[in-house]
């Protein structure tokens, strides 16, 4: 295979992963077919098995990609706001926003893939990717929360508490979108977590 063909194949593979990552967060694994994913990437269904051994393999890779986006946001905020007192409110403003609520396809994998992971086989690629992604998110939040002299275990517990609260709030806000309660949930939780950051 020529270098151009290899580059095209790598590009097509990445396009499929990106499309799948978005569709997974919008619809869940059961709501995404191989044909839809390939079409969303601008490719034909027949080319799928040139890139992936199964839909399950693709779903695991796409979940990893979705978590990569979450970690990129945490890294960007950490770089832009080196002090924990500034990073926290910035993260909360972005995470608990109407824009994030209204765009699940580009949203947090912790929220968007939780239900699918809960239903997935314990040793399946989606579940394994999800667990690894949540662990990495917790570690990223620890980095945002950590200050000199902090007790590592206490910071880790706080990171888990913040992540669980943020995911819960975003889930409820999405489920009540269109009602004033949705905005209220985002505002109340954002304020509460900012005060406890």
Image (tube, grey):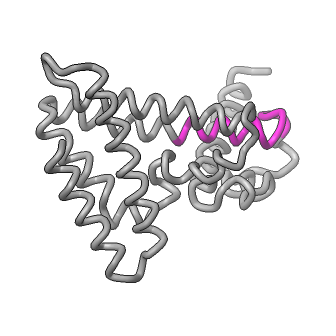
Frontmost residue, 86 versus 158: 158
Task: Identify the residue at the far top of this view.
Answer: 149
Quarter residue 61 falls in: top right
Q: State left or right for residue 59 relative to residue 90.
A: right
Q: State left or right for residue 38 relative to residue 173.
A: right
- Count of number-bearing discs: 0
Q: State left or right for residue 20 relative to residue 147.
A: right
Residue drawn at (66%, 37%) of the image: 127
Q: Identify the magenta region.
A: 49-66
Q: Is residue 59 magenta?
A: yes
Q: Secondary structure of the magenta portion, mostly?
A: helix
Residue drawn at (45%, 29%) of the image: 136
Residue 45 visible (yes or no) = yes
Residue 143 visible (yes or no) = no
Quarter residue 36 falls in: bottom right
Task: Identify the residue at the far bottom of this view.
Answer: 179
Q: State left or right for residue 85 relative to residue 142.
A: left
Residue drawn at (63%, 43%) of the image: 15
Quarter residue 96 falls in: bottom left
Task: Identify the residue at the far right of this view.
Answer: 46
Residue drawn at (34%, 40%) of the image: 73
Q: Position of residue 191 (x, y in %)?
A: 18, 58
**Quadrant of the rendering where the C terminus is positioned:** top left
Q: Position of residue 66 (x, y in %)?
A: 53, 42
Q: Is residue 33 above or below residue 163?
A: below
Q: Position of residue 43 (x, y in %)?
A: 75, 50
Frontmost residue, 139 versus 77: 139
Q: Is residue 171 above or below residue 119?
A: below
Q: Position of residue 130 (x, y in %)?
A: 58, 37
Q: Is residue 95 magenta?
A: no
**Quadrant of the rendering where the N terminus is positioned:** top right
């Amino acid at each position: 295979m020529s270098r151009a063909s290899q580059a095209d194949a790598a590009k097509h593979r990445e396009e499929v992963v990106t499309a799948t990552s978005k569709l997974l967060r919008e619809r869940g694994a059961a709501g995404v077919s191989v044909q839809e994913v390939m079409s969303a990437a601008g490719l034909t269904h027949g080319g799928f098995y040139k890139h992936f051994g199964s839909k399950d393999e693709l779903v695991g890779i796409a979940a990893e990609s979705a978590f990569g986006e979450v970690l990129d946001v945490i890294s960007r905020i950490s770089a832009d706001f080196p002090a924990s007192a500034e990073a926290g409110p910035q993260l909360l403003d972005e995470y608990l926003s109407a824009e994030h609520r209204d765009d699940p396809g580009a949203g947090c994998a912790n929220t968007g893939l939780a239900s699918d992971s809960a239903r997935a086989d314990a040793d399946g690629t989606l579940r394994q990717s999800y667990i690894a992604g949540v662990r990495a998110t917790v570690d990223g939040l620890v980095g945002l929360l950590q200050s000199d002299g902090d007790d590592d275990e206490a910071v880790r517990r706080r990171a888990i508490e913040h992540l669980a609260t943020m995911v819960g709030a975003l889930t409820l806000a999405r489920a009540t979108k269109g009602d004033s309660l949705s905005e209220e949930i985002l505002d109340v939780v954002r304020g509460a977590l900012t005060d406890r950051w």
